[in-house]
Structures are given as structure tokens and as C-alpha cells.
């Protein structure tokens, strides 16, 4: 049995101190999308498809990127995707690196944040990006169907 799952990541930007109406950093996000999930396979399903893009002005040397807890479970670990036509929840998470050792969150509950820095020698304004590394743990007994979750990505200089 194969399941197709998607995690929808909603991007927001922060208005920071300075001239009213001008953001020091803005961002955009591409969704983390997982391929088919087979409940009988004993290996996790990984995804490297989501990316956070940050664009900052010259007066910002770094920006911290956080990701909220799951809107489905209200937790960072595990986050959960809900079945579109039922009540099943498929656990997953988003990590800061391909090693998938540190859960990307807001720095609380054992999670880590990502700090993007202005590239050396790069004149302002600057742009940086970070891949979101997703994983669905193996051997979850869930119904077939489409699963999704919503999390909020925030950038703060």
C-alpha cells in the first residue's frame, strides 16, 4: 500500500525595527514533499525538496530561521500529518541537515534553529538558502490517502 504525502510550509516574513514599512529580511519557502510511503517497508522515507530562501538588507549580517510545531499535533517531536479524509496521523519531522540529527524548530523542546549569515565578500543586500530535510519514520500503520500538515517558517534578523 503506497501513500502520497505532502507537508505544506507557509512562509511569513517579519517586519523588524528600523524605518517603518521596510523589512530587514524577507523570505520565500518551497514545500517539503514526500514521495509514496509504504507501511510495509522498514526504511524511512526522506525528502530534501523543501528550501527556505532569505533575502536581507545591507545592515543585517545574519538571520535566524525557525519552524513552528505541527498544526496537527501541536508538537515538534513528532510532527504529524493528518489524513485528508479521516483521522489518521502520519508522524514526520523536519531537520537542519542531511544527517537528520537535529530537529528544526524554534530552539525550545530540544529543537534547533538555523542561522544564515551574509556570505563573505558579498555586498549587500544578500540572499541565502537552506534545505529542509524531511523524514517519515518507517512502519507506521496508517490508512491510504493524502496527508498534510501546516507549519510556519519565520525569519528574524
Image (cartoon, rainbow, N blue to C red):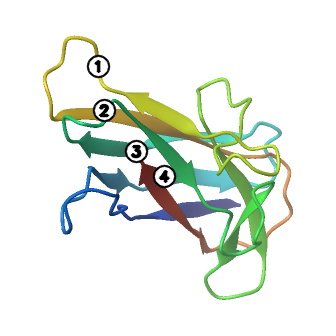
Identify the disc placed on residue 26: none
**In the rendered structure, are the residues bearing label 4 and label 1 in contact, judged by CB atoms less than 8 Å apart?**
no
Q: Which residue is mark 1?
A: 119
Q: Quadrant of residue 146?
A: bottom right
SS type, badge 4: strand
Q: Where's residue 142, x and y in %?
A: 80, 68
| Residue identifier under label 3 | 157
Q: Is residue 51 left or right of residue 59?
A: right
Pointer 3 or 4: first along the chain: 4
Label 4 crowd bin: few (<14), some (14–19), many (20+), radius 10 Å: many
Q: Residue at x 15, y 30 (%)?
A: 124
From the top left corner, tell me how far across and down residue 90 is, in percent: 75, 64
Label 2 vs label 3: CA separation?
13 Å
- Give the mark, 4 or 1, whose residue is nearer the N terminus: 4
Mark with earlier residue (2, 3): 2
Pair 2/3: label in front: 3
Say whether marks 3 and 4 touch (CB < 8 Å). Answer: no
Number of other residues with Cα within 10 Å of mark 3, as a class: few under 14, some 14 to 19, many 20 or more: many
Q: Nearer the viewer, mark 4 or mark 2?
A: 2
Residue 57: quadrant of the picture: top left
Mark 2, residue position: 128
| Mark 4 or mark 2: whose residue is earlier in sequence | 4
Which residue: 71% across, 61% down? Answer: 1
> Could you tell me which secondary element the residue under label 1 belongs to?
loop
Q: Earlier in the sequence, mark 2 or mark 1?
A: 1
Secondary structure of the residue carrying numbered label 3: loop
Amino acid at each position: 500500500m503506497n501513500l502520497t504525502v505532502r507537508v505544506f510550509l507557509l512562509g511569513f516574513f517579519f517586519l523588524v525595527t528600523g524605518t517603518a514599512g521596510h523589512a530587514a529580511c524577507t523570505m520565500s519557502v518551497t514545500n517539503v514533499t514526500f514521495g509514496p510511503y509504504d507501511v510495509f517497508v522498514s526504511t524511512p522515507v526522506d525528502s530534501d525538496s523543501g528550501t527556505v530562501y532569505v533575502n536581507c538588507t545591507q545592515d543585517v549580517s545574519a538571520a535566524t530561521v525557525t519552524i513552528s510545531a505541527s498544526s496537527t499535533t501541536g508538537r515538534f517531536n513528532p510532527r504529524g500529518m493528518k489524513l485528508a479524509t479521516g483521522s489518521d496521523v502520519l508522524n514526520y519531522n523536519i531537520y537542519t541537515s542531511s544527517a537528520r540529527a537535529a530537529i528544526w524548530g524554534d530552539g525550545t523542546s530540544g529543537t534547533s534553529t538555523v542561522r544564515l549569515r551574509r556570505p563573505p565578500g558579498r555586498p549587500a543586500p544578500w540572499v541565502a538558502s537552506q534545505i529542509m530535510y524531511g523524514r517519515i519514520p518507517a512502519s507506521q500503520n496508517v490508512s491510504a490517502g493524502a496527508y498534510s500538515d501546516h507549519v510556519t517558517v519565520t525569519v528574524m534578523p
